[in-house]
Structure formats: structure tokens, C-alpha cells
Image (cartoon, helix red, strand yellow):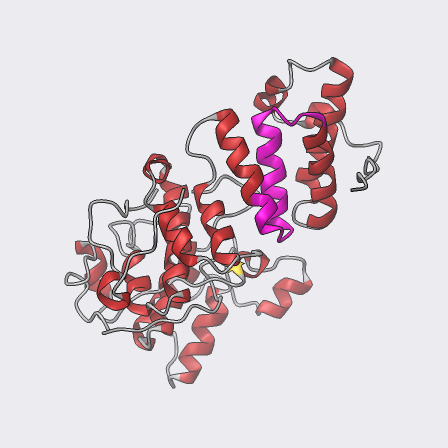
Amino acid sequence: MVREPMPELPDEVDAGDLDTEVRRALLGMPKVMADLVARHLVATGALLDSDPERALLHARFARRKAARVGVVREAAGLAAYHAGEWNEALVELRAARRLAGGPGHVAVMADCERALGRPERALDLARTPEARQLPADQAVELRIVVAGARRDMGQLDAAVVELQGTDLDPARVQPWSARLFYAYADNLLAAGRQEEALRWFVNAAQADSEDETDADDRAVELASELGRTVEGTPLPRSTSREARQAGGTSPRSSERPGPADGTSSGEPGTGRAVDDPAEAGAPAGAGEEETTGTGAGGAGPSDQAPSPSAEVPPATSLDGRDDPGEAEAGHRPNQED
């Protein structure tokens, strides 16, 4: 197998731009080599969104030079995920977790399993001890991925239930709320609960101060289909999706390479509609606003799922509550590490 040559580094790429903690992880290497690896890691981060394939080349080179450094393997895994190299991403992220400890990027790993057509393994990852160690934002991302996996398995109502929790509350907006609300709306729509979906697309648009999703466009589009308006609940942006993309700002959901995006990837679903959120295990606050359901989808393997360029975000642990897919699917996926 021919080894890839070292990708060219622009002169302006400076090792000093690397995060201090990451630089500290390279201290055991000779300084010249540590600086070279650091520059390639800086290039990886700079190219991740605009040119993920080139970013992956830089990450692979860094990995060859520092294969025993956990943060380097982590960077290689996230770059591979962003470039759509799902198997490579899994290998690197597993290695990073072994080397560095901690829960690792569970949501990204689960999203890779989903992208590879293995939604059952995505559910298995969500049941691991590592999943219970995730911080709040990464746990939310994992819920979005799990909801997408449920849809992949034809469990539309179970996908809605996966996203319900005390944080599904438009009165308490968190940094991850826009993506959670969007995923909930998308899954509600997939389950045929259009009125509720419209309400949650509006909630998502109002929470989306960073323009991560196309919730405003989805709300207007769905309102038009239903013969409704969104008057009384003004959306924060009036520009169209096309205008935003022309300006270089595209919704985060469409940026995601994987099925777990939580925005609009194909996730089938079956089963009885959950009309009472309390019956489905929804939190007290969530049931008051919706009477039909919720949903999380994804564009590709993870449209609205974990953000490959960032840390992957805690939500409600799947352990300690009944598997929402059991009643519909009649089985549990095999546990695989």
C-alpha cells in the first residue's frame, strides 16, 4: 500500500494556533516533530468545514507521526467522520478513547454505525456506561442520533419518544435547544403529526440564534401546506434558505455528513401514535405543548447529529427506562461493544 505524501502546509499555518491542551499532549515528542504535527492539526481544523477531504489528509499525516497520542487519533476520527469515512472514523475514535480515557465521542460513533446501515449498533452504544458519562450537550446529540436510528428501523413513534425530556421546553432555551427542537419537529412530521411539527419548527426557529438549522424555512413551508400562517409567532429570520446559502451560511443540518443529523435524513417508522406525551414517557413540561409527537431525523448519516468539528454532546439516559422501540419492533438489538 502506497503511503500518502505529506500534504502541503501553507506558510501561515502556525503551530502556536493549536489549543494549549493539545500542545501539551505533544510534549513527549521531539520539538521539531511536535511542531510539524501541531501545524497539520491546525490545518485539519481550518479545513474541516470547507474541504473535509483535505482536512483528512492532514489528520492522517499527523496520525502517522503521533499514533500513540489520543488527541491526534481523536482529530483523525473527527476528520474522517466529516469526510464520510465512517469505518475509519470508528477505528480512530475507539483508539482515541483507549488512549485518552473518558467517554469519547459516543454520539459520533453511534452516527457512524447508523451511516453504515447498522442502527442496532447505534442503540447499543447509547446503552453503554460511556453514554451515561456524557455532558448535557453531548447527551442531547446522542438522543438525536438514537432517534434517527429508530426511524431507520421503522420505529417512528419510538423516535419521537427518544427526544422527549425535561429539556424539551421552549421556555428554557439552551445552546443545544434549536437542534433538539428541530429534530423533535422533524420526527413529529415523519410520524404524521403535522400540527405539532409546525409548532416545534417555530420553536426551533426562535431558539436558533446561530442559524444552525433551516427551521424557519421548514415552518413556513409546512404552514403553507396546512393552509396556515405563522402569524403571532414571528420567526427571527426572514431570509430564505437559498439566500443564506448564497451568503455562505448554510443550515447545520445540511452540513452533516451522517444519518444521525437529526434534521432530515430518511428514517422510517411504524407503530401507534403516542397521543398522550405522559403515556409515552414524556416529561411534564413537554406534554403541555404537544399532543401528537416529536421527531428527530437527519440528513445523511447525521444531519442534525453530533457536530463532527466540535465535541459531541447529555440527555436522558436510555438506561433506567423501558426501550421505546420494544413495543413497536418487538426486539432489542444485540449488544456489541
Looking at the image, which residue sits at the far left?
279
Q: Is residue 101 above or below residue 198?
A: above
Residue drawn at (66%, 45%), measured in percent from left and top? Answer: 48
Which image quarter: residue 66? top right
- Count of marks, rendered view: 0
Relative depth, front residue between 45 and 203: 45
Side of 311 relative to 186 (left or right): right
Q: Is residue 46 above or below residue 269?
A: above
Q: Position of residue 18 (x, y in %)?
A: 66, 27
Relative depth, front residue between 187 and 246: 187
Which image quarter: residue 128? top left
Residue drawn at (53%, 41%), measured in percent from left and top? Answer: 310
Q: Position of residue 125 (x, y in %)?
A: 39, 45
Looking at the image, which residue sits at the far bottom?
227
Q: Is residue 182 above or below residue 80?
A: below
Relative depth, front residue between 193 and 332: 332
Relative depth, front residue between 58 and 307: 58
Side of 157 relative to 258 (left or right): left
The quadrant in which the N terminus is found is: top right
Side of 278 relative to 41 (left or right): left
Side of 25 relative to 200 (left or right): right
Residue drawn at (36%, 40%), measured in percent from left and top? Answer: 131
Q: Position of residue 287 (x, y in %)?
A: 20, 62
Boundaries of the magenta span: 65-89
Q: How would you classify the magenta stretch by its main secondary structure? A: helix
